[in-house]
Image (cartoon, rainbow, N blue to C red):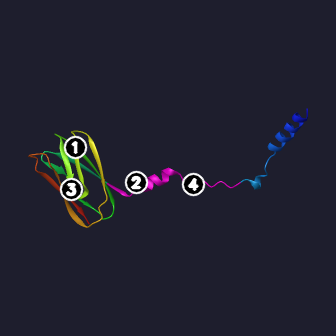
Amino acid sequence: MNKFILLFILLGACTTTIPADMHPQIITPPPLTDLQERSIYNITKIKIDVQQFDFLPNEIIVPKGEKVRLVLTARDVNHTFTLPEFGIDEELDVGEDVHIEIWPNDTKTYVFYCDKPGHNMQGKLIVS
């Protein structure tokens, strides 16, 4: 019987309410979607169509220090996109978008090209 009385006393002590002014304040962080949207606006997106025997456009001008996303699509046959200064050599399969991100930090003109035999295609990435 003493055990039951002790149990009721303990349960009663555990169920007491804490006054509202003693609750810790909860700080809510900003929503993640706001951070994601801000980062999206810092990327320059450039669409490049690749076909025999040209990149369209074949001259791209981007600002120095800004992240660039190139979206390349081979339209007729398989090609490559090679940009040696950035260590890029990507195979482009017909009809598939290939996304490449670069972050040019030097004011310079870079040459990109297709290294498939006989294609002789090239273009310029101008960082200003």
What amino acid type is highlighted by mark number 3? Pro
Identify residue for label 4.
29
Reading the chain from its start, which is encountered first: label 2 or label 4?
4
- Badge 1 is on which residue? 92
* Displayed quadrant of residue 26: bottom right
Q: Which residue is denoted by mark 2 in the rendering?
A: 40
Locate residue 16, reporting x and y percent.
82, 45
Q: Secondary structure at mark 3?
A: helix
Amino acid beneath label 4: Pro
Residue at (25% x, 57% y) in the render: 86
Horizontal arrangement in the rendering, residue 80 relative to residue 9 (left or right) = left
Q: Quadrant of residue 106?
A: bottom left
Residues packed near mark 2 inside 10 Å, few (<14), some (14 to 19) or many (20 plus): few
Which span is picked out in magenta? 24-44
Circle 4 SS class: loop
Q: Residue at position x 22%, y 44% from top?
A: 91
* Residue mark closest to the camera, 3 vs 1: 3
User: What label sits on residue 23 in the rendered view?
Assistant: none
Are the two marked residues, 3 and 2, in contact with CB atoms closer than 8 angstroms? no
Badge 1 density bin: few <14, some 14–19, many ≥20, Cα 10 Å: many
Whole-percent x, y for residue 97 in the image:
27, 43
Q: Residue at x 22, y 43 (%)?
A: 92
**Residue 42 magenta:** yes
The residue most toward the top is 1
User: Which marked residue is nearer to the observer: mark 2 or mark 4?
Assistant: 4
CA distance for labels 3 and 2: 26 Å
- Between the C-alphas of marks 3 and 1, the distance is 16 Å
Q: Position of residue 65 (x, y in %)?
A: 33, 64
Seen at 73% across and 53% down, the residue is 23
Which secondary structure lies at badge 1?
Answer: strand
Q: Is residue 25 left or right of residue 94?
A: right
